[in-house]
Amino acid sequence: MQIIDQILELDRDLLVYLNNLGSPTWDSFWLVVTNKLNFIPLYIFLLYLMCKNLSKKAILILVLSLIAMITFTDQITNLFKFSFERLRPCAQEGVMEQIRQSACWGYGFFSGHSSNTMAVAIFTILMLKLPNRKMIYLMLPWSIVVGYSRIYLGLHYPLDILCGLTFGVFSGLLFYTLFKYLERRLVVV
C-alpha cells in the first residue's frame, strides 16, 4: 500500500505545482477551453469531414457509433468516479487550500473530459487518416489541452487526466473498430 500512497502524494504535488503556474490573466481562457459546448463548431466540422464521402446508411452508423462511444466513455467514467470516490482536488481538505480553483463538487477519478476528448480525437484521426494525415497534429494536442484545463482549474489530479486520456484511446479504438465492422456488414458498396 505504501507505493500507492507515494504515487498519490506525487500526483498531489504535481497538481499543486501545475495548478499554481496559473494566473488570473489566463483564467477566462482555461474556462473557455474546459467548456464542452464551446467545441460544438469543431464537432460539426469534424462530423462533416467524416461524413462527406459516406453513404447515408454509413453516416447513420457513424453517428450512432459516435453517440455510443461518448455514452460509453461518459458512463464508464462515472462508474469509476462513484466506485473509487476520490474527491476532486478542489474538494479535498489539505489540497484545496494550496491550489487555485473554480466551482467544485463530487469525485474526480478519472476525468470524463479527458476520456471523451481523447476518444473523439482517436476516432477522428482513424476516420480521416488517409485524406487528412495532419489531423493528428490538431486532435491529440486539443485533447491534452482540454485535460490540462482540468488541472489548471483544480478539478482533477494529473493521474485523473492520464487515466482519462488512456481510457479515451481505448474507447476511440474500440468504437472505430465497431464502426468499421458495422459498415462492412451493413453497407453495400
Image (cartoon, rainbow, N blue to C red):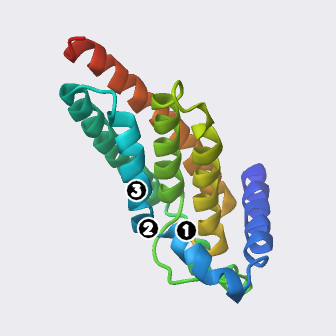
> Which residue is the site of mark 2?
38
Which numbered disc flags the more N-terminal residue, 3 or 1? Answer: 1
Q: Is residue 101 above or below residue 14?
A: below
Which numbered disc flags the more N-terminal residue, 3 or 2? Answer: 2
**What secondary structure is marked by label 1?**
helix
> Which residue is the site of mark 1?
33
Q: Is residue 97 above or below residue 56?
A: below
Give the total of numbered labels: 3
Give amino acid for label 2: Asn
Q: Quadrant of residue 26?
A: bottom right
Give amino acid for label 1: Val
> Which residue is the site of mark 3?
78
Instruction: Kindly report the distance in space between the C-alpha atoms of the residues bearing marks 3 and 2.
Output: 22 Å
**What secondary structure is marked by label 2?**
helix
The quadrant of the image that shows the C terminus is top left
User: Pointer 2 and pointer 1: residues touching (CB < 8 Å)?
Assistant: yes
Relative to 52, is 158 on the left or the right? right
Q: Which percent across, then down, holds residue 137?
A: 65, 43
**What secondary structure is marked by label 3?**
helix
Q: Residue at x 25, y 38 (%)?
A: 64
Instruction: Kindly report the distance in space between the C-alpha atoms of the residues bearing marks 2 and 1.
Output: 7 Å
User: Pointer 3 and pointer 2: residues touching (CB < 8 Å)?
Assistant: no
Q: Residue at x 44, y 55 (%)?
A: 42
Few, some or many residues within 10 Å of mark 1 (<14, 14–19, 20+): some
